[in-house]
Amino acid sequence: MGLHRVVEPAGVLPQAAWRLDASPEIAPNEVRIRVERLNLDAASFRQLWEKHGGDGDAVRAEVLEIVSARGKMQNPVTGSGGMLIGTVEEAGRRSPLGLRAGQRVATLVSLTLTPLTILDGLARWDGRSEQVPCDGYAILFARSIAAVLPADLDPQLSLAVLDVCGAPALTARVVSRYVAERERERADDPTPVRVAVIGGAGKSGSLSLAAARRAGAARTVGVVPVVAERDALTAVGLADAVALADARDPVALSTAVTTALGAPADVTVVCVDVPGCEHGAVLATADGGTVVFFSMATSFAAAALGAEGLAADVTMLVGNGYVPGHAEFALGLLRSESGVRALFEARLAAD
């Protein structure tokens, strides 16, 4: 679990530690990765970007400062990090990950618990995008997860997908359970399952829309904040309806979802990277429904207390980023769903 890498405070797991030992020498059950690119999570990058008023040099300087001080990339405001791609340099003889030197991999664990050293000062990054070209090394533990990069996809595209691969896998699991339950209750004419994805044009949002449809959702709506995203999501046809609403406005969000679906959502998936969306998501969800929070900007206290204050009988799930088979599932959606791929490639081109 990497406990031996915790410098301070003693006794906590690496994710909760303030500082990690990022020295390159590996234990017999560790793996050292030569890093070629980081992918900062959306909430962290947005916070840094807004803090520095769009000054890329200042964003780059703060990322370097965080990594140098903490031995990992963990935004002290959002608490989140991201993930990386690179090449295996050395695998310890007792590592259970099955990796070998020379393999190009993506880590499927957060940078918030991954010992990291940057060697090039991020000289090739302008601080203006989530993807960060760099040279350095990172350490994986025995309980870490990594995926060998597929040969048929551009590494940057794979990195973008794998960064959010937990979202579609959990969405599919939750939606399929609702569908199965409805079919058991009324096999002749099951009640349709309705799904709302807040932030439907983004990375995790577009994958979650595709996953919900594949899992049997009868009607889906993607909610986006601006006209450009509405037009882009409409053009690729991933959702049955696309609604324009500010997710931070609870009544407007609930109204948009209910109007688009004809009723509140059975499952609401929150994929936005800004705070303050908790109450709207709860309000947009039917009694007995489920809200899945995939945003690192979520205040879970606000979600719980908001649901209590609204007397909302909803189950709230924390998307923890890991579901067995999540990497293969997300990459499969990218390959088979042209709409998903179009949105991802457009995003990378814009970056």
Image (spheres, helix red, strand yellow):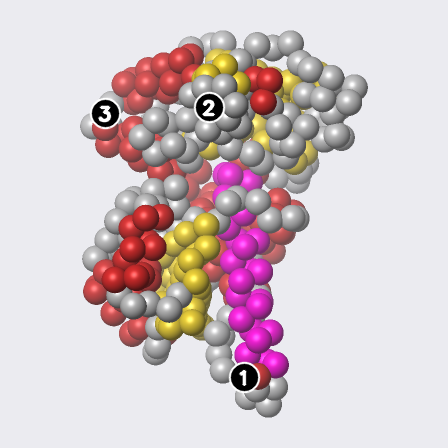
Is any part of residue 312 visible from this angle?
Answer: yes
The single residue placed furthest to the front in the displayed view is: 11
Q: Secondary structure at mark 2?
A: loop
Name which of mark 1 and mark 2 comes first in the sequence.
2
Q: Nearer the viewer, mark 1 or mark 2?
A: 2
Return the x and y of residue 161 as percentages of the image width and height.
53, 42
**Which residue does the numbered mark 1 point to in the structure image?**
190
Say what amino acid the circle numbered 1 marks: Pro
Mark 3 surroundings: few (<14), some (14-19) or many (≥20) residues within 10 A: some
* Residue 275 image point, x, y percent: 28, 45
x and y percentages locating residue 62 in the rendered image: 32, 18
Provide the residue designation for mark 2.
17
Q: Which residues are magenta?
A: 160-184
Is 162 one of the magenta-colored residues?
Answer: yes
Q: Which of 245 and 185 lies nearest the eye of the viewer?
A: 185
| Quarter of the picture holding the N terminus | top right
Task: Choose the circle earlier in sequence order: 1 or 3.
Answer: 3
**Disc 3 designates what residue?**
52
In the rendered view, does 133 fall on the left or right side of 76? right
| Residue 211 in sight from this viewpoint | no
Q: Is residue 349 above or below residue 134?
A: below
- Left or right of 98: which side holds 224? left
Q: Amino acid at mark 3?
A: His
